[in-house]
Amino acid sequence: MTDIGIGIVGGGYMGKAHAVAMSAVAAVFNTRLRPRLEVICTTTEEGAAEKARQFGFARSTADWQTLVADPKLGAVVIASPQDTHMAIALAALSAGKHVFCEKPLGLGVEQSRVMLDAARASGLVHMTGFNYIRTPASQLARQIIASGEIGDVTWFRGEHTEDFCADPLQPASWRTRGRANGNMGDLAPHIINAALALIGPIRSICADIETVHRTRPSPSGPEPVTNDDQGHIMCRFENGVMGHLFISRVATGRKMGYAYEVSGTKGALRFDQEDQNALWLYQASSPASRQGFT
């Protein structure tokens, strides 16, 4: 096989990102297997046709079942709202299609386990879209921690903070409706994934969430916000490391505050994705006159 047909469910921000990536991956990485953009699915036929034209798909549809059943597809990318993930993934796996599903997998642990079990049983390639931990700086951080360069880890602090819902006059939208679309379903998975990747499994937590702006303007008047704006988690990792996570979509001034600090017995690390090519390292073994984060 030299190419593989790709179908993408969802034409929004992430659907576009996947389409652009699929178009560029072969040239950038010189892969033997080349993605071929076959079908895109959005909520309307007209919208799907326009996205197909913009992104370079051969066909379009407003029915995800039509996409999954397409014989020219070898893989399906799920970039639609969380409450659609399980049905699409199970159908795609049943049809023999490889699946890349955006986070979070399902509406909760139960759905996610069903999806994972089905993927494993299928023998097909499957993956969840945690892209931030795979940036070069964070991959280097993983190597530094694993090698023991900063010694035994003693503390971890992580945050994912953005301000796209900070304005209380911002109108109600899909982000402010339903349990699945809140801050804990949208931003939290990324920094929790970073904590798991950098430090390891979490043993226990004490957590709290909050809806800061309880109503949003809408054409029919103030509309209740039915999910959370921010939350914080104190945790203890299986290896004994103490940690804290803060997640917010109302953090005024933050655009991509995917950030973490790791303290160890021989050094420390700092990273902030608003400056994504810089990883700050402190080495306690340096002479006193040259100690500091570099």
Image: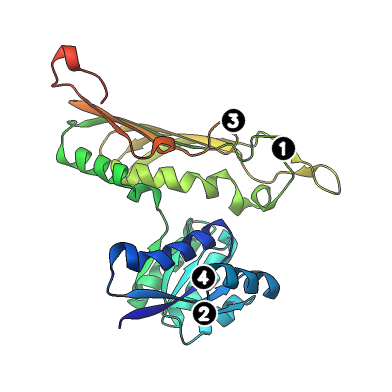
How far is disc 2 from disc 1 in space, using C-alphas? 38 Å
Say which mark, if any, is on residue 214.
Answer: 1
Discs 3/2, front? 3
Of labels 3 and 2, earlier in sequence is 2
User: Which residue reaches farthest right?
Assistant: 220
Question: At label 1, which amino acid type do we have?
Answer: Arg
Residue shown at the point (21%, 43%) measured from the top left: 143
Q: Position of residue 164 (x, y in %)?
A: 61, 40
> Are circles 2 and 1 on residues that touch, CB within 8 Å?
no
Give above or below for 213 relative to 39. Answer: above
Question: At label 2, which amino acid type do we have?
Answer: Val
Q: Nearer the viewer, residue 277 or 261?
A: 277
Question: At label 4, which amino acid type do we have?
Answer: Ile
How far is disc 2 from disc 4 in space, using C-alphas? 9 Å
- Residue at disc 2, secondary structure: helix
Q: Which residue is mark 4?
A: 8
